[in-house]
Image (cartoon, rainbow, N blue to C red):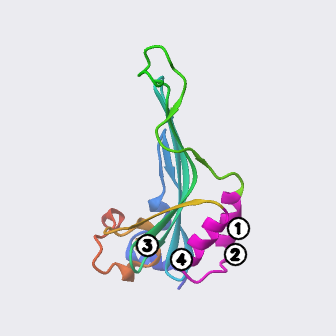
Amino acid sequence: MGFIGLASACGVAPEQCAVSDNHFGKGVPKDLGNELVLNTSSGSYGNNRTFLSFSNYSVIDCRTGEEKTFVLEDIFESNRGTDGGQTDTSPVAIRPRVESGDAGDQLLAYLNAGNFESLSEIAAKAEELGIVVREQTNENEDCGCAAFYPRLLGDKEPAPERNA
């Protein structure tokens, strides 16, 4: 039985994990093998005071909940200026600006080739490409893990999609 069949058997299809609205999108997760799942997310928001734009890949180890987020773009600026918007309305960075250029495409090609064994190998490749890597451990099951590796729930809180 393939992964899609397994996903259907446990009640979570990968397509259920995708989210989209006016400002945010999370793509359909991809099974990378080795109990690793790839998520993509991006979004933007702007008004007359702030501008936010981001794009990330994240890979989750479904066994442990360990997640590495590869920041492809992170722009968060305010045009309130240095004096709170009284006279100066030039953009001020709220966070350090990150723009990875074509390094994101190179990382995606690496992920699609599957020439890695672990999450740490993927993180090392991303750092070699100059991509900012953020890490965390999730106590909640990722939807992609529920779809592709439901038997690895362990002590994690089940993904809400299991009950959808």
Q: Which mark is residue 113?
A: 2
Task: Pick whichever of labels 1 and 3 is earlier in the sequence.
Answer: 1
Query: 86 or 152, which is in the foreground?
Result: 86
Judging by the rendered image, the residue that carries numbered circle 1 is: 109
Kind of residue sitting beneath label 3: Cys
Q: CA distance from mark 2 to mark 1?
A: 6 Å
Task: Pick whichever of labels 4 and 2 is earlier in the sequence.
Answer: 2
* Prevailing secondary structure of the magenta residues: helix
Camera-nearest label, 1 or 3: 1
Judging by the rendered image, the residue that carries numbered circle 4 is: 120
Which residue in the rendered view is the most extreme toward the front? 83
Asked whether the residues under the numbered discs 1 and 3 touch, taking CB atoms below 8 Å apart as contact, a structural biologist would say no
Above-or-below relation of 79 to 38: above
Say whether residue 127 is magenta.
yes
Camera-nearest label, 4 or 2: 4
Q: CA distance from mark 2 to mark 3?
A: 20 Å
Asked whether the residues under the numbered discs 2 and 1 touch, taking CB atoms below 8 Å apart as contact, a structural biologist would say yes
Q: Residue at x 71, y 63 (%)?
A: 106
Kind of residue sitting beneath label 2: Ala
Q: Is residue 57 visible?
A: yes
Judging by the rendered image, the residue that carries numbered circle 3 is: 145
Say whether residue 86 is magenta.
no
Above-or-below relation of 12 to 5: above
**Magenta stretch in the rendered image:** 103-129
Q: Residue at x 72, y 55 (%)?
A: 102
